[in-house]
């Protein structure tokens, strides 16, 4: 044990003594490890972000959008879902505790005194806050009577409040929505941007009846509805049941595509992971390649070093070092350098990730796992590429090494 | 019982097709405590013989017994342990580690001691540095020392594990005559302290320190 420690110390001394070798090996390892670190952090960040979003979306939720996914592009989907469909679903699915219809209309001008804002109006029932687990921070949610009575009342998103009211409290005051005077009843908590880049805080929520009749001039069709189930563990079954129920309801013939689209938590995760996937793949290739390059740099510099230190090896052998002692020393030197490279790479990756996050709002999450993966890989490179030079050093004949 | 007993030692190298015999049947005994000078013309096989005696190399054929133990047939690891415990080498060009300081160089053999360590190596290293007159140079790098001082460090290193045999291959070859005398005085002091010393030299003044001279010629011991 003491011998192991002694040799390790000798390796440390050599790492300090041969600075140029240490520097080049360390730098090349650090580059590779930094991209690996970013990959791990990005992957973890993506998953974390995905689960956060699913948490907001509701792991027990499905959302049904009108229009076929395959035949119509986003934004041009026709409305194919009616309030009757929603009512039928509500009656048929006792497994659901909440069914909320929704409609929405973009490019709406909202104004208060001399302040104006282009925004989106969402038509919802009284359960909006609950359906989206989106707290009302001031005032109150829409009521059943608001919906029944087609009242001109609204919940405002955070940005709408800031633009139209500044620091003032908007509750009880009036805004013009599409020239309709509307009383503000509540304010929603700030929610930032959606993963697709939509600003979630620039929106106005009004009773669905009011929006359909007075803004959209629509009697039947809505944009989508949201359904939440009691048992979140059976979401796949629920999705199947809902799909066949809606197909029957809309009279879609066997084999024809759905004329609606169901968005589920798993689908959201899939989308988000795919979004991160391209960056991960790119950095993955870069990272692995630079690690392999770093490995070859290390192997070559170590072979040179063994040549340069042939006498040292001879001297060590003459005073009693075994082959295994020499091999162990050079391996220790390699692993010591790559470990330092790993730590430097982690720091570099951390800085790089900070840059990516500020520049592109990329989700990053650093945990011990990113560090462990980096360190593990740097050890692997050190052992893998250090082994050959170390064995060459160990197998030198003492007398020949001394004569060098 | 002699410390070293060599019987009909042969060593040959194959150079391409040709087999060149460097040592051609050497039989030699060295007694414990002897101070031996190994002399002979260049290329006669002195270094080759010393390497075999020091267990740095193995003979092609022949029997070598050190302190009653048969050396021929030991594995590479066993030879390493043998060198570590029993042999102290002093080389013509010192062979100190350039990046280690004086004290670290002296301590080098103690790092490879197998099993339990006897005594405190650091204390012993400092004693030896005092003995060779370099106690105030502990932290110096070899490059900061003169040739004579470097050779003293090498002698301290050779002694640190308390070996039975000191093997010096032209230890004064790189030194001027007065420094050479100092080094030889030091080795002689070791000899008087009970160590067995073997010195290869071309220099008669150096050889004069020896109690016994062994002459080599064409791979054979003469006289
Ligand atoms: N590995 C080897 N392969 C081939 N020949 C060798 C090898 N090692 C030594 N020799 C040859 O063996 C002969 C004896 O070498 P050795 O070094 O023992 O001589 P020496 O008596 O120490 O000479 P010097 O006084 O010059 O040091 C030389 O001719 C040398 O060329
Ligand atoms: Mg020689």
Image (spheres, rainbow, N blue to C red):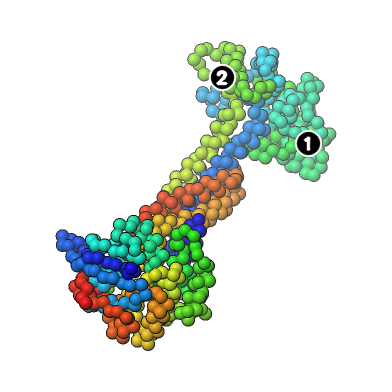
Q: Read off the chain for label 1.
A: A
- Image label count: 2
In the image, residue A69 sits, relative to residue A360, either above or below, namely above
Kindly identify which numbered label has been placed on residue B93.
none
What subunit carries mark 2? A
Mark 2 Cβ inside 8 Å of ligand 1: no
Question: Which residue was labeled with disc 2?
Answer: A259
Q: Residue at x 42, y 48 (%)?
A: A289
Closest to the observer, B118 or A85: B118
Q: Is A65 placed left or right of A18 in the picture?
A: right
Q: Position of residue A49 (x, y in %)?
A: 61, 38
Alpha carbon distance from label 2 to label 1: 37 Å
Identify which residue, A106 or A279, lies in the foreground. A279
Is residue A194 among the parts visible in the rendering?
yes
Can residue A174 be seen at all in this image of the molecule? no
Residue name at image x 41 percent, y 54 percent? A386
Residue B220, x across and y down, in percent: 20, 72
Q: Residue furthest right?
A: A172
Mark 2 surroundings: few (<14), some (14-19) or many (≥20) residues within 10 A: many
* Ligand 1 quadrant in view: bottom left
Find residue A304 and report its horizontal and vertical position in percent.
Answer: 36, 62
**Residue sitting at 50 percent across and 48 percent down?**
A376
Q: Is residue A70 left or right of residue A311?
A: right
x 56%, y 54%: residue: A347
Under 8 Å from ligand 1: the CB of mark 1?
no
Residue A339 vs A56, above or below: the answer is below
Occupied quadrant, residue B15: bottom left
Q: Quadrant of the C terminus of chain A?
A: bottom left
Q: Is residue A227 above or below residue B18?
A: above
Q: Which residue is mark 1?
A: A137
């Amino acid at each position: 044990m003491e011998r192991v420690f002694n040799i390790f110390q000798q390796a440390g001394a050599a790492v300090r003594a041969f600075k140029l070798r240490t520097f080049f090996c360390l730098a090349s390892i650090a580059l590779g490890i930094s991209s690996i670190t970013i990959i791990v952090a990005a992957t973890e960040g993506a998953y974390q972000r995905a689960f956060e979003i699913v948490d907001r979306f509701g792991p027990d939720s499905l959302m049904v959008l009108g229009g076929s996914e395959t035949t119509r592009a986003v934004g041009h989907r026709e409305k194919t879902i009616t309030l009757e469909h929603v009512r039928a679903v509500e009656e048929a699915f006792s497994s659901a505790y909440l069914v909320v219809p929704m409609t929405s209309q973009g490019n709406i001008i909202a104004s208060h005194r001399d302040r104006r804002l282009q925004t989106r109006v969402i038509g919802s029932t009284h359960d909006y806050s609950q359906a989206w687990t989106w707290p009302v921070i001031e005032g109150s949610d829409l009521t059943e009577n608001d919906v029944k009575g087609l009242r001109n009342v609204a919940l405002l998103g955070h940005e709408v409040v800031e633009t139209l009211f500044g620091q003032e409290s908007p509750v009880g005051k009036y805004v013009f929505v599409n020239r309709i005077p509307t009383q503000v009843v509540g304010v929603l908590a700030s929610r930032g941007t959606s993963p697709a880049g939509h600003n979630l805080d620039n929106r106005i929520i009004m009773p669905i009846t009011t929006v359909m009749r007075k803004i959209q001039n629509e009697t039947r069709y809505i944009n989508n509805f949201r359904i939440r189930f009691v048992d979140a563990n059976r979401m796949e079954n629920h999705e199947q049941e809902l799909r066949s129920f809606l197909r029957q309801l809309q009279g879609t013939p066997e084999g024809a595509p759905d004329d609606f689209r169901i968005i589920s938590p798993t689908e959201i995760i899939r989308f988000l992971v795919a979004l991160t996937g391209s960056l991960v793949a790119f950095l993955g290739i870069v990272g692995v390649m630079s690690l392999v390059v770093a490995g070859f740099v290390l192997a070559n510099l170590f072979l040179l070093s063994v040549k340069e230190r042939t006498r040292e090896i001879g001297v060590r052998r003459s005073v009693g070092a075994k082959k295994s002692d020499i091999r162990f020393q050079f391996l220790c030197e390699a692993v010591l350098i790559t470990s330092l490279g790993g730590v430097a790479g982690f720091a570099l990756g951390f800085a790089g990730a900070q840059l990516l996050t500020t520049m592109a709002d990329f989700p990053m999450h650093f945990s011990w796992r990113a560090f462990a993966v980096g360190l593990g890989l740097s050890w692997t490179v050190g052992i893998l590429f250090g082994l050959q030079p170390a064995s060459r050093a160990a197998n030198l004949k003492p007398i020949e090494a001394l004569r060098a | 019982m002699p410390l070293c007993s060599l019987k009909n030692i042969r060593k040959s190298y194959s150079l391409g097709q040709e087999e060149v015999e460097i040592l051609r049947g050497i039989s030699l005994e060295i007694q414990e405590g002897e101070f031996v000078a190994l002399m002979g013309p260049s290329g006669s096989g002195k270094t080759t013989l010393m390497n075999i005696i020091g267990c740095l190399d193995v003979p092609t054929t022949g029997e070598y017994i050190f302190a009653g133990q048969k050396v021929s047939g030991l594995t590479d690891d066993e030879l390493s342990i043998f060198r570590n415990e029993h042999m102290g080498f002093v080389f013509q060009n010192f062979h100190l580690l350039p990046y280690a300081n004086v004290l670290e160089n002296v301590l080098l053999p103690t790092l490879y001691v197998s099993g339990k360590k006897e005594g405190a190596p650091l204390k012993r290293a400092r004693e030896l540095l005092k003995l060779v007159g370099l106690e105030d140079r502990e932290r110096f790098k070899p490059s900061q020392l003169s040739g004579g001082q470097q050779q003293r460090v090498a002698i301290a290193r050779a002694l640190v594990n308390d070996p039975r045999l000191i093997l010096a291959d032209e230890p004064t070859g790189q030194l001027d005559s007065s420094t050479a005398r100092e080094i030889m005085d030091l080795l002689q002091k070791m000899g008087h302290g009970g160590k067995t010393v073997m010195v290869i030299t071309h220099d008669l003044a150096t050889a004069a320190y020896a109690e016994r001279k062994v002459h080599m010629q064409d791979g054979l011991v003469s006289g």
